[in-house]
């Protein structure tokens, strides 16, 4: 490397001066020679560089990752020592019946007023009214989702009939998508968005989910799938500190057994719920005139956090809430003692079985088309025969279509919207479209032999493919 002569002279002068200074002071010379700049961009002067004392800190700050860029802690099990936890009592919304932060199940046969009972409980909360046992309900808000009843013509009139405050009751109408469109609310997918909506409302004490089976994304008869699907609902109850009440049906048959075992679907529904309530007819009692009177009862069938017996009598009444609008309401009676198993009788006594089957089938199809295979599977779990389901589909005019050359049959309620894209593409952009290649099961559309009320229902072929009827 070639240095300029003047720079060499300067360096030599500095060195000589340092030697002279060292001789006078007795210290070794410290030389910081200034290197010549052959190219200012390539050879910067040393005094323009940071001090060596600052170099380690500068290097550390340049190489250390930002806190936000640091890797998260490794995946592992989180433990809590019992000594670090503080015991807490169960927070009751209704002492012994509805607990804040917990999942509950209300089950019963069709026609027992399960939804009307739930709305009566919601009404008590919205006005700070009285529970069936006479205790005071804390004032709060109620949130209701129903996949079976319309909010305007059924649910709201019943709430008004029960004396509820409309401004404290909210009905879930759907889910707003990113593009601004409104889609049907799906309990199996939209609980996260629901939690945010509950935060904006504030003070929600009770959430009603009707039917609770809609929260299950998979097979409602498989224990693991039901448990996995219900866990977000359990977590929502805890996070929002509200009582969640899921409504469901009884399976047909099994009278005299534990009512909690008669809930439709997997036993996980009653296992996950902390409290299981049942609504059903009870043994008739003789009145003062010697005549037997029908009674209904709301009873505790199971509770992991309180008493699991006892109940309250109730009746169903019709009343006019507004001009020309009729609605049912609950008339609470006296408290009764005993287990739910002791109090229950056959809830299908003096009840038309065809009504039960139609109601069951309507409930299954209320959320949209469903495969015949799954319908028959659910019906079997509920105690309904394949033939009774087929006969009910004829009476109801259920729409049926083949899903493909090798596919099975799909059923839908009459006039239902087939919103999903199908293979033929015929439903694209069509409003209120029905199935393409639909086989109507309404009796008037069938050949005369099939119209006959005594005609035997069709059976499945040997290859296991479901036929439309």
Image (spheres, helix red, strand yellow):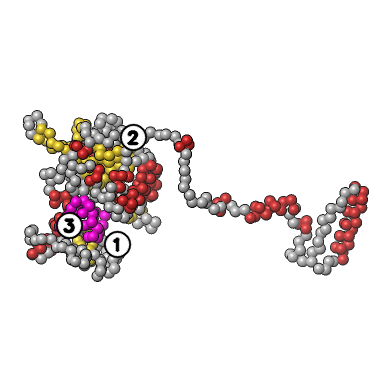
Give the CA distance from mark 1 to mark 3: 27 Å
Residue furthest to the front: 257
Residue 342 at x, y = what percent?
A: 19, 37
Give the CA distance from mark 3 to mark 2: 43 Å
Q: Nearer the viewer, residue 312 or 309?
A: 309
SS category of the residue bearing label 1: loop
Residue 167 colored in magenta in the image? no
Neighbours of disc 2 within 10 Å: few (<14), some (14-19), many (20+): some
Residue 383 colored in magenta in the image? yes
Which stretch appears magenta? Answer: 359-387
Q: Which residue carries the number 3 mark?
A: 386
Say which label, 1 or 2, has the lower sequence index: 2
Q: Which residue carries the number 1 mark?
A: 420
SS category of the residue bearing label 3: helix
Q: Is residue 111 above or below residue 48?
A: above
Q: Nearer the viewer, mark 1 or mark 2?
A: 2
Q: Quadrant of the C terminus?
A: bottom left
Residue 28 at x, y = what percent?
A: 87, 51
Left or right: residue 345 versus residue 128 is: left
Tell me, for residue 92, which label it has, or none: 2
Residue 220 at x, y = what percent?
A: 28, 52
Give the CA distance from mark 1 to mark 2: 43 Å
Q: Residue at x 38, y 33 (%)?
A: 89
Dominant SS type (magenta):
helix
Say which label, 3 or 2, has the lower sequence index: 2
Q: Quadrant of the N terminus?
A: bottom right
SS category of the residue bearing label 2: strand
Say which label, 1 or 3, has the lower sequence index: 3
Q: Quadrant of residue 406?
A: bottom left
Q: Is residue 115 above or below residue 364?
A: above
Q: Residue at x 45, y 37 (%)?
A: 82
């Amino acid at each position: 490397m070639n240095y300029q002569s003047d720079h060499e002279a300067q360096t030599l002068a500095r060195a000589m001066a340092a030697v002279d200074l060292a001789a006078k002071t007795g210290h070794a010379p410290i030389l910081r020679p200034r290197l010549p700049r052959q190219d200012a961009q390539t050879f910067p002067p040393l005094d323009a560089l940071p001090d060596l004392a600052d170099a380690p800190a500068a290097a550390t700050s340049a190489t250390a990752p930002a806190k936000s860029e640091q890797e998260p802690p490794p995946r592992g099990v989180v433990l809590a020592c019992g000594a670090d936890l503080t015991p807490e009592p169960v927070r009751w919304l209704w002492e012994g019946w509805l607990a804040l932060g917990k999942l509950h199940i209300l089950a019963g046969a069709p026609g027992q007023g399960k939804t009307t009972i739930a709305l009566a409980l919601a009404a008590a909360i919205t006005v700070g009214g009285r529970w069936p046992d006479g205790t005071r309900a804390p004032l709060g808000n109620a949130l209701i989702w129903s996949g079976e009843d319309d909010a305007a013509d059924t649910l709201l009139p019943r709430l008004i009939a029960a004396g509820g405050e409309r401004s404290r009751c909210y009905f879930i109408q759907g889910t707003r998508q990113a593009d601004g469109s409104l889609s049907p609310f799906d309990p199996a997918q939209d609980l996260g968005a629901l939690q945010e909506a509950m935060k904006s409302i504030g003070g929600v004490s009770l959430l009603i989910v009707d039917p609770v089976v809609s929260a299950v994304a998979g097979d409602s008869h498989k224990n693991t799938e039901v448990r996995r699907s219900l866990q977000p609902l359990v977590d929502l109850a805890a996070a929002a500190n509200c009582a969640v009440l899921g409504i469901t049906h009884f399976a047909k048959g099994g009278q005299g057994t534990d009512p909690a075992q008669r809930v439709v679907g997997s036993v996980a529904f009653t296992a996950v719920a902390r409290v299981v309530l049942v609504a059903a007819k009870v043994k008739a009692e003789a009145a003062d005139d010697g005549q037997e009177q029908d009674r209904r009862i709301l009873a505790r069938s199971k509770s992991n956090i309180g008493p699991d017996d006892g109940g309250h009598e109730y009746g169903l009444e019709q009343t006019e809430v507004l001009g020309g609008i009729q609605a049912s309401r609950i008339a609470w009676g006296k408290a009764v003692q005993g287990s739910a198993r002791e109090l229950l009788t056959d809830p299908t006594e003096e009840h038309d079985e065809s009504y039960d089957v139609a109601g069951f089938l309507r409930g299954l199809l209320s959320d949209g088309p469903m495969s015949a295979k799954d319908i028959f599977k659910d019906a079997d779990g509920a105690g309904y025969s394949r033939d009774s389901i087929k006969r009910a589909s004829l009476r109801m005019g259920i729409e049926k279509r083949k899903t493909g050359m090798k596919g099975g049959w799909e059923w839908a309620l009459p006039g239902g919207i087939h919103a999903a894209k199908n293979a033929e593409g015929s439903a694209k952009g069509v409003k209120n479209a029905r199935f393409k290649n639909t086989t109507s099961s309404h009796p008037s559309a069938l050949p005369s032999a099939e119209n006959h009320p005594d005609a035997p229902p069709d059976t499945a072929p040997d290859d296991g493919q479901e036929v439309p009827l």
